[in-house]
Amino acid sequence: MTLIFLACFAVCWVLLARHRWGRYLYAIGGNEEAARLSGVPVAWTKTTAYAMSGLMAAIAGICQAAQEQQGDPEAGAGYELTAIAMAVIGGTALSGGRGGLGLTLLGVVTIGYLEKILSINAVPEASRLMLTGVIIVAAVLTQRRRNT
């Protein structure tokens, strides 16, 4: 699983940091109308971004099913909050246009270790979700304070 994650990370890093499509994504995230007026193919770029998102979700689903050795349609329920927390801790702005994969990897590792520690100590799921929510709120407030 780690090798598949690192391969997906490397592909995404190359696309976002070294490819025109990545610059287009950041431009659209910052201001979609300004990007359109600058000549960015907004519809194509957004469609491709959604397709890449779907591809990565499919890879994650296959890995999850392989790890558990069964398919469960409810297996990923609640992962959205964790994914948002990982991105926000990594410095990705929820308002868009700012972020990077390097620090997001740090957010993934941080939340992953936090989840593992809480799981080992038998902390209930509701408490884990509340703690994740508090982390997101704190990170967003820190971003807002930094931007003003």
Image (cartoon, grey):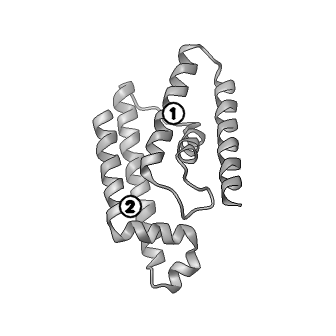
Answer few, some or many: residues within 10 Å of disc 2's Cα (few below 14, many 20 plus, some between 14 and 19). some
Whether residue 148 appears in this view of the structure is: yes
Earlier residue among tags 2 and 1: 2
- Front-lying residue, 41 or 114: 114
**Rendered-image quadrant of the N terminus:** top left
Give me the residue at 71% from left, 61% from top.
148
Q: Which mark is residue 44?
A: none
Q: Amino acid at mark 1?
A: Thr
Give me the residue at 48% from left, 84% from top.
38
Q: Is residue 75 above or below residue 140?
A: above
Q: Secondary structure at mark 1?
A: helix
Give me the residue at 64% from left, 27% from top.
128
Residue 62 lies in quadrant: top left
Residue 50 lies in quadrant: bottom left
- The answer for how far apart the CA atoms under marks 2 and 1 are is 22 Å
Residue 139 located left or right of residue 52: right
- Front-lying residue, 45 or 106: 106
Q: Which residue is mark 2?
A: 16
Q: Secondary structure at mark 2?
A: helix
Q: Amino acid at mark 2?
A: Leu
Q: Which mark is residue 110?
A: 1
Residue 127 located left or right of residue 53: right
